[in-house]
Amino acid sequence: MGNRIAIIDGHPDREAGHLCHALAATYAEGAEAAGRAVRQIDVAALDFPLLRTQAEFQTGTPVPDIARAQETIAWADHIVIVYPLWLGTMPALLKGFLEQVLRPGFALDYGEGKWPKKMLQGRSARIVITMGMPGFAYRWIFGAHSLKSLERNVLKFVGIGPIRETLFGMVDAADAAKHARWLETMRRLGERGV
């Protein structure tokens, strides 16, 4: 259970009304009501370039918004990442954010050309994904490939674990009652800090 929680809202559109924003906010409300400390990162509000070279990734200096996001992640003992599924994976802006944030020197230590040391151990995570298809279809027909990649190739690679997941499917067809149940699920998860 996390007592210091970083919530990363990875929806690339800042406009209000998106389910991802409501899910992230409701998780935060639940966590704060239970006495947990919460910091939020709104990826759509950040100003950062895409990395274009290996040198930028390995030795570039993070821009101020990315440095602040790194401070928040370093502070947290639990990280919640909320995003919509776009073309079977996370939106490009969120991927660009993760490439900027989880770079050598912060998330990895390559030392003397050795296998990298995982620098974010001791943190757990929850991944929350909204999608137009049923969640079971994403898992069983499509193999949840992008979720597995985020878990294994990104979060576990830098030492984050355990990782839990919550999928909300058929969001475009969901009525107000279903949205309310989803928000209540997020509130309870926030209260528990998981």
Image: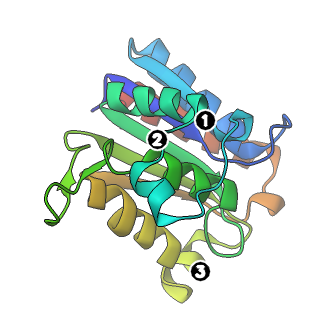
Q: Amino acid at mark 3?
A: Ala
Mark 3 or mark 2, which is nearer to you?
A: 2
In the image, taking residue 184 as reference, residue 192 lies left or right, namely left
Q: Is residue 66 above or below residue 132?
A: above
- Give the crowd class for mark 1: few <14, some 14-19, many >=20 residues within 10 Å: many
Q: Amino acid at mark 1?
A: Ala
Report the residue at 47% width, 45% height from top. 101
Is residue 38 rendered to the left or right of residue 129?
A: left
Locate residue 49, reporting x and y percent.
67, 48
Q: Is residue 39 left or right of residue 137?
A: left
Q: How is the image coloured?
A: rainbow
Which label's residue is closer to the chain start, 3 or 2? 2
From this viewpoint, is residue 161 visible?
A: no
Discs 3, 2 touching: Cβ within 8 Å: no
Residue 115: image location, x then y, percent: 16, 66
In three-dimensional space, the C-alpha distance between marks 3 and 1, rounded to whole angstroms, equals: 24 Å
Where's the N terminus, which quadrant?
A: top left
- Count of picture labels: 3
Q: Nearer the viewer, mark 3 or mark 1?
A: 1
Quadrant of res 192: top left
Circle 3 residue: 137
- Pick the front one: 53 or 129: 53
- Residue 80 image label: 2
Which element is circle 1 on? helix
For the residue carrying disc 2, how many other residues have a C-alpha within 10 Å: few (<14), some (14-19), or many (20+)?
many
Q: Position of residue 182 (x, y in %)?
A: 62, 44
Residue picked out by circle 1: 24
Q: Looking at the image, is mark 3 or mark 1 earlier in the sequence? A: 1
